Amino acid sequence: MVGTGAGTQPEREEKVSLELTEEILQSMEVGMVFRDYNGRISSMDFHKTSSYLVNASDDESIRLYDVASATCLKTINSKKYGVDLVCFTSHPTTVIYSSKNGWDESLRLLSLNDNKYLRYFKGHHDRVVSLSLCSRKECFISGSLDRTVLLWDQRAEKCQGLLRVQGRPAAAYDDQGLVFAVAFGGYIRMFDSRKYEKGPFEIFSVGSDISDANVVKFSNDGRLMLLTTKDGHIHILDSFRGTLLSTYNVKPVSVSSTLEASFSPEGMFVISGTSSAMFLCPSLI
């Protein structure tokens, strides 16, 4: 404990709130570049309540960053299993990630503090192409090229539920964990987490785009959702009514890549990009 003398004010951490506008986003510049990679970055995730960022690379590594100080805190190699998708749990130094070795499709709960596996989640029989965690609960969802979507509890090794699909799936929980979405074949199917076995309570169309689903996500407030597809489209929908609000074209998209996109924290913008450009789109909220 550090004492304070008479007339000395104790230090307090001040948090500054800034309204995100198109002008502010367009005025942003690169502050730091990390070049110590020997492969494509396959996924990345920001922790909900800390300043940490985690990413996975084709060089079989997982890196943890503190974006507030622009420093790489730790590099963990996964030479045996490889690494493809990675997501934070509610804890800022614990992640779940998928393999990329072609022979073991287990998901792994990893402590970044001491590089120890806390749990293995076995169930998929082909590459995992979608992974989403609920930030307010211990549940997560995964989708695989084996045409299954599995529901998990971080505290149990066996899956808690299974859905069979007719295509490459993209799946995601909303922020509350009450609803999850599964997208494939030009449609987004909405499920109640408490009674998913009864089937979807809503099915939303994204028009004529029936190409493979890449990513489906909810905005933080749950009012919007987005879907990216193999053909380079970003569809933005009203998550309550299923109304297709807007579609953006993001091309070219590499054959070996999946098109990523994310909502800004308040849901006003969608950010995406390719290897040659970054795109900033109004979400029409």
Image (cartoon, helix red, strand yellow):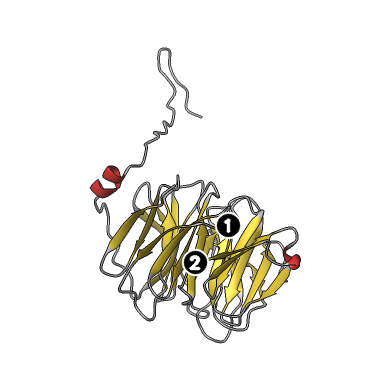
Please state the horizontal and vertical placement of residue 59, each as a whole percent of the image.
Answer: 39, 76
Mark nearer the N terminus (2 vs 1): 1
Taking the image as shown, residue 236 lies to the left or right of residue 143, namely: left
**In terms of secondary structure, where does tag 1 sit?**
loop
Residue 156 visible from this viewpoint:
yes
Question: What residue do we see at 58% from left, 57% from top?
Answer: 89
> What amino acid is found at the position of numbered circle 2 in the picture?
Val
Please state the horizontal and vertical placement of residue 205, each as a whole percent of the image.
Answer: 53, 66
Question: What residue do we see at 43% from left, 58% from top?
Answer: 262
Please state the horizontal and vertical placement of residue 223, each as a whole percent of the image.
Answer: 53, 49
Q: Nearer the viewer, residue 162 or 153?
A: 162
Q: Nearer the viewer, residue 15 or 249?
A: 249
Tell me the distance, in whole angstroms, between the alpha carbons under discs 2 and 1: 30 Å
Report the residue marked by disc 2.
206
Q: Nearer the viewer, residue 237 or 274?
A: 237
**In terms of secondary structure, where does tag 2 sit?**
loop
State which mark lies toward you, 2 or 1: 2
Q: Nearer the viewer, residue 246 or 2?
A: 246
**187 to 269, vertically: above or below:** below
> What amino acid is found at the position of numbered circle 1 in the picture?
Thr
Quadrant hosting residue 40:
bottom left
Question: What residue do we see at 52% from left, 49% from top?
Answer: 220
Please state the horizontal and vertical placement of residue 278, each as a whole percent of the image.
Answer: 29, 61
Outermost residue toward the bottom in this view: 103
Task: Name the disc covering residue 89, or none.
Answer: 1
